[in-house]
Image (cartoon, coloured by chain):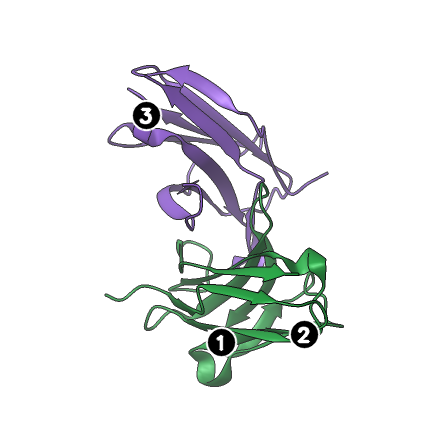
Amino acid sequence: QKEVEQNSGPLSVPEGAIASLNCTYSDRGSQSFFWYRQYSGKSPELIMFIYSNGDKEDGRFTAQLNKASQYVSLLIRDSQPSDSATYLCAVNGGGNKLVFGAGTILRVKS
Amino acid sequence: EAGVAQSPRYKIIEKRQSVAFWCNPISGHATLYWYQQILGQGPKLLIQFQNNGVVDDSQLPKDRFSAERLKGVDSTLKIQPAKLEDSAVYLCASSLRVDGNTEAFFGQGTRLTVV
């Protein structure tokens, strides 16, 4: 079992819709969870982080964490074509080790 | 605040040659990561430093890859000899603390092509 799993996609949504990206992780001791966005040919940039169970909102982005189910998600409201990118889920377990999933490709169609 | 600096941006070498990459993390960041990202895949952790000590190098191919972080600041990653499958983007990232509740910031990466 991979440490961090994501559906590779592509996930296609129309402009203005809600995009839902999901991630599961294997290490129950994981402490913090991150979503990065990566445009083609660019390096990952941090969008959001979440440490506690529940929801965390930042503008159009909402991160959701359920530690009991070992599940973290990212919702993007009012999706825009500029949101088209690969979204990487990263999990920080013991020793500050940051492990990434393979990423989900998001395509927002205008 | 300056970001994570990496050089070179691009490198093309022949197989069996050697290559070195350099990374200067954000000032004051204790943790430094080197990742390898093959096209279409997520970043794979090669080595993690906290200050100048190695925390995790379990996925570093030690027969050909080496890394050091002298004085707990900048770091170099070396490949010798390179193989075709080493073609990838090598990403350096740093984070402020060592307790896990801190985000990591990435440099621009070095795109390596082995021919």
The residue positioned 46% from the left and 36% from the top of the image is: A87
Measured Cα–Cα span from mark 2 to mark 3: 42 Å
Q: Chain of mark 2?
A: B
Q: In the displayed structure, would residue B8 be above or below residue B91?
A: below
Q: Which residue type carries mark 3?
A: Pro
Q: Nearer the viewer, residue A47 or B84?
A: B84
Q: Residue at x 55, y 58 (%)?
A: B35
- Which residue is labeled 1 in the image? B75
Q: What residue did someone put label 2 on?
A: B17
- Number of other residues with Cα within 10 Å of mark 3, as a class: few under 14, some 14 to 19, many 20 or more: some
Horizontal and vertical percent position of residue A46: 37, 46
Residue A71 placement, left or right of B27: right
| Amino acid under disc 2 | Gln
Res. A55 in view = no
- Among the chains, which one is green? B
Establish if B114 lies above or below A108: below
The x and y percentages for residue B55 are 59, 69
Where the N terminus of chain B falls, by quadrant? bottom left
Q: Where's the C terminus of chain B, which quadrant?
A: bottom right
Disc 1: host chain: B
Q: Residue at x 40, y 64 (%)?
A: B97
Element on which disc 1 rests: strand
**Dot 2 and dot 3 residues touching (CB under 8 Å):** no
For the image, the number of numbered tags is 3
Q: Residue A81 got which mark? A: 3
Dots 3, 1 in contact, CB < 8 A: no
Image quadrant where residue B77 sits: bottom right
Q: Position of residue A18 (x, y in %)?
A: 36, 17
Label 1 sits on what residue type?
A: Ser
Tell me, by letter, which chain the rendering colours purple.
A
